[in-house]
Every structure is written in structure tokens, then in C-alpha cells.
Image (cartoon, rainbow, N blue to C red):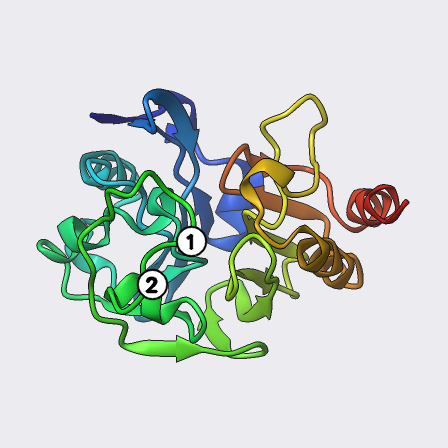
Amino acid sequence: MASANDSSMSATDAERDTGVHVLPITVEYGGQELTITPTLVETDRGPILIDADPQGARDGVRTHLRSLGYDLADVWLVLVTHHDGDHAGGLAALLERVDAVVATHRAEAPYISGESEPITGDGDRYPPVDVDIELADGVRFSTLAGPMEVVATPGHAPGHVSLYLPEANLLVAGDALVADGDAPLSGPKPRFTPAMEQAIESVGTLADLEIDHTVCYHGGYVDQGTERIREIARQLDE
């Protein structure tokens, strides 16, 4: 069961200016209620959906899309930051309604396609789907907010990626950063990060970018960027 959070129905100034929209959805996942934040990025071709949510979240995504004047069928690309079930578990159900291309980093593709079992999870893997585009660091997509660049941020998962929109000074961090704890923006959670040292290096990579606004899958939109990310990198390196 999933529901779209009412608070997202009125777009923020940043969303209106950039065409990048957060889609907070409350789901039941892993035996608990969880709020997740997939992201919609507008392009001349139609919307790109970043992350596909757990199984059962499709209706929440559709509600958000309709509030923005789109339908599920308008999504032409689903870009998956990594293969964890709360990001990719709903891909198969989504693709029953959407004729979209699936893209993820080449190191994540075997997990999503079913060639390899997910690294984390409870053993009940989600339905696999074919990956159409295998991404690499530096690949760019054209969006209404300017180029959106794939930034390799491994650690939380082998091929985890974040998405950087330099003309908007905006970062879609995936799980490389989180915003659902005591601090408004924090580093990756060690409990859910198999390669923490690598994840810390990835935070350092993000700290080199010019960022004013950050979107975390866990925590949503945060009006913080480079200065805070550099602070996080220093704390993690101590």
C-alpha cells in the first residue's frame, strides 16, 4: 500500500524553476512505514523518473504525475540510482503501464536484470527487468534545467549513481546522502552501506561540485549543498 504525500502537491519555487520535482510517497517496506522520494525531471521528450520505488508504489507515483500534468505513459526513461528493493522493486509493475527505457549503472545492471542476487534485502527478491542502457560516470541527459550528469558514487551499492544538474546547482543524491535523521543533511547510513570507505570517498566527490540544493531519496528536498557536504566529508574522514 502506498500513498502520495499531500505536502508535495504544491511545487516549491525550486521545482517550478528547474522542472525537477520531488515525489514523496509513504509505503510499507521491510515491515515498517517508510517515506521515500523518487524524483521527476522534465525534458523536451517528456519526464524522466529517477528510481521506481518498492513494489506497490505505482499508484503513488501516478498521483504525483497527474498533479504535474503528466500520466504514467508520459515517462520515457526510468533511471535507477541502484538496485536496492526500495528503489527498483516496483520496476516490473511500472513497466506494465509504461513503455519506458530502463537505465542504470553497468555495475548495477546484473542485479536489476536478475543475473545476480541483490546484495542487501530479506531474500525475497523483486521481479527482475531488462536494462536497456548501462550508464557510466559522466554520461549526460538533456533536461529543461540543462544537462543532467551521471556522477558515480559507489559505496552504498557497487554502481550507485547520483545525478547533478550544474546549471541549477542541484544534486539528486540517491542514497549517497540522506536527510531523514537529526541533521538536515547527512552522510550515508553505515548500517545500510556495505562499502562504507568507498561511500565516504563518494561524499568527497560530491563535495567538489557546486551545489545549492540537494534531493535525497530518504528525506527529500534540502536547501543545503556544497558547504554542508564538505562538512559531512570532513566528519566522515575523521
Numbered disc in front, either 2 or 1:
1
Instruction: Identify the residue at horizontal 40%, vertical 33% (top origin).
Output: 24
User: Would residue 237 be found to the left or right of residue 143 on screen?
Assistant: right
Is residue 77 visible in the rendered structure shown here?
A: no
User: Would residue 111 be found to the left or right of residue 173 on screen?
Assistant: left
- From the image, which quarter does the C terminus lie in? top right
Instruction: Identify the residue at horizontal 61%, vertical 50% (top origin).
Output: 176
Residue linked to disc 1: 119
Give the CA separation, mark 2 to mark 1: 8 Å
Pinpoint residue 194: horizontal percent, then vertical percent.
57, 50
**Label 2 is placed on what type of residue?**
Tyr
Is residue 134 visible in the rendered structure shown here?
A: yes
Q: Earlier in the sequence, mark 2 or mark 1?
A: 2
Residue linked to disc 2: 111
Residue 149 occupies quadrant:
bottom right
Pinpoint residue 154: horizontal percent, then vertical percent.
59, 62
Tag 1's secondary structure?
A: loop
**Label 1 is placed on what type of residue?**
Ile
Residue 137 occupies quadrant:
bottom right
Pinpoint residue 46: horizontal percent, then vertical percent.
29, 64
Q: Residues within 10 Å of mark 2 (few under 14, many from 20)?
A: many
Seen in the picture, residue 91 relative to 30 is either above or below; the reply is below
Given residues 115 and 105, the one toward you in this image is: 115
Given residues 215 and 47, the one toward you in this image is: 215
Pinpoint residue 107: horizontal percent, then vertical percent.
45, 72
Q: Residues within 10 Å of mark 1 (few under 14, many from 20)?
A: few
Given residues 226 and 191, the one toward you in this image is: 191
Seen in the picture, residue 25 relative to 107 is either above or below; the reply is above
| Label 2 close to label 1 by CB (< 8 Å) | yes
